[in-house]
């Protein structure tokens, strides 16, 4: 029987245009656990869209801060939630100049429109602070991660933190599609760029919270457990 997994994500407020845009794109609201009508970008095939977004829909709309993990021996969800509240209370938020739609290899995501050293420091400090709650990776999970080509630094991060894309390898992104056929990447990116511009004004984005998500089984979707305002 698989154990639940937890993850620490940035998930915007439920009443924000950003949350509505991302959740509508994926067809899933991780706060309610319910499917949503797909907000299919103009020019994209509505019959294909559920397949193109199937992988990120499992996780809900988010940006990863601490990747999914099982709880370490002796740790509980109650203790994790308590630590989240205390940790958030002592943090200042981070303001990004804005978010842009970009193709990251074969998938499309929202990324910061400009690099942010403050965001990099914020994310790595959170990864390190919550490390005592993370159980070591199973052999199967480690083998799965090692299938991807990793730099020596990323390999060291994987061994230390259970995830290779932390520290200077961290790239804040909010995934909008799964892996796309190469010929679909550019047109889907352009369609999502237009949909994002129509849904949201070009404005700074404030990371004023982080969220705890839980996945009850490996074949189930992640749900938002709680959201913690910073400061």
Image (cartoon, helix red, strand yellow):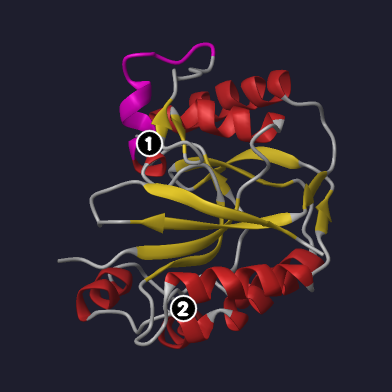
Mark on residue 180? 1
Q: Is residue 186 left or right of residue 21?
A: left
Quadrant, the C terminus: bottom right
In whole angstroms, how far apart are the C-alphas of marks 2 and 1?
A: 24 Å
As rendered, which of 59 and 230 lies closer to the eye? 230
174 in relation to 9, above or below: above
Rendered location of residue 150, percent (x, y): 41, 74
Q: Does 150 lie within the magenta span?
A: no
User: What residue is drawn where x is 44% and y is 74%?
Assistant: 163
> In the structure shown, which secondary structural element does the residue marked by tag 1 occupy?
loop
As rendered, which of 135 and 156 lies closer to the eye? 135
Q: Are marks 2 and 1 in contact (CB under 8 Å)?
A: no
Dot 2 crowding, Cα within 10 Å, few <14, some 14–19, many 20+:
few
Rendered location of residue 194, percent (x, y): 65, 20
Rendered location of residue 79, percent (x, y): 51, 76
Q: Which residues are magenta?
A: 42-54
As rendered, which of 132 and 97 lies closer to the eye? 132
> In the structure shown, which secondary structural element does the residue marked by tag 2 occupy?
loop
């Amino acid at each position: 029987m698989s154990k639940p997994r937890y993850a620490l994500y940035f998930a915007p407020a439920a009443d924000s245009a950003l949350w509505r845009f991302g959740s509508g794109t994926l067809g899933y609201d991780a706060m309610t656990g319910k499917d949503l009508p797909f907000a299919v970008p103009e020019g994209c095939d509505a019959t294909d869209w559920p397949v193109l977004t199937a992988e990120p829909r499992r996780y809900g709309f988010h940006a990863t801060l601490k990747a999914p993990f099982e709880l370490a021996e002796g740790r509980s969800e109650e203790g994790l939630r308590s630590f989240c509240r205390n940790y958030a209370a002592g943090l200042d938020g981070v303001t990004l100049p804005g978010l842009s739609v970009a193709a990251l290899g074969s998938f499309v995501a929202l990324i910061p429109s400009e690099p942010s050293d403050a965001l990099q420091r914020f994310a790595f400090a959170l990864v390190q602070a919550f490390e005592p709650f993370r159980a070591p990776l199973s052999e199967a999970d480690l083998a799965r991660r090692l299938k991807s080509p990793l730099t020596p630094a990323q390999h060291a991060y994987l061994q230390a933190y259970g995830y290779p894309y932390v520290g200077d390898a961290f790239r804040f992104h909010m995934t909008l599609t799964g892996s796309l056929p190469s010929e679909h990447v550019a047109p889907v990116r352009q369609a999502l760029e237009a949909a994002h511009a129509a849904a949201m004004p070009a404005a700074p984005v404030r990371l004023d919270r982080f969220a705890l998500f839980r996945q009850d089984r490996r074949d189930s979707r992640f749900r938002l457990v709680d959201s913690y305002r910073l400061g």
